[in-house]
Amino acid sequence: MGKHTKEPWDCNSKGQIHSGDFHDSDGATIICRTNNPKDAYRIKACVNACEGIPIEMLEGLPLGFMEH
């Protein structure tokens, strides 16, 4: 698996998530676009909170692990 875009990620009120490599007309680096800006804010928060945690470890966590 290749490397993902380095954190921190950010987002805007249009539902665009951005960081370092590709730029839109405003100069922001667009990683992806969502249909719902609230989804973009949640994705941004999750990615930034998981910075430094290997993907294999994240994928191994059971759903609802925070409830335990």
Image: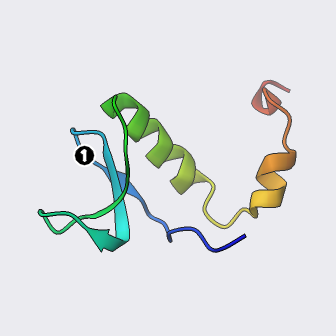
Q: Residue at x 78, y 26 (%)?
A: 64
In-image side of 33 versus 13 (left or right): right
Mark 1 falls on what kind of element? Answer: loop
In-image side of 56 versus 27 (left or right): right
Query: Residue 8's spot in the image, x, y percent?
Result: 44, 64
Which quadrant would residue 51 be assigned to in this image? bottom right
Query: Residue 49's spot in the image, x, y percent?
Result: 57, 52
In-image side of 8 versus 33 (left or right): right
Q: Residue furthest left?
A: 26
Instruction: Name the foreground residue: 33 vs 63.
Output: 33
Give the colouring mode of the picture. Answer: rainbow
Q: Residue at x 32, y 71 (%)?
A: 22
* Residue that badge 1 annotates: 12
Which amino acid is tagged 1?
Asn
Which quadrant would residue 66 be assigned to in this image? top right
Query: Residue 40's spot in the image, x, y percent?
Result: 39, 39
Q: Quadrant of the C terminus?
A: top right
In-image side of 36 versus 8 (left or right): left
Query: Residue 7's spot in the image, x, y percent?
Result: 48, 66
Q: Residue at x 36, y 65 (%)?
A: 19
Q: Quadrant of the N terminus?
A: bottom right
23 w.r.t. 65: above or below: below
36 w.r.t. 26: above or below: above
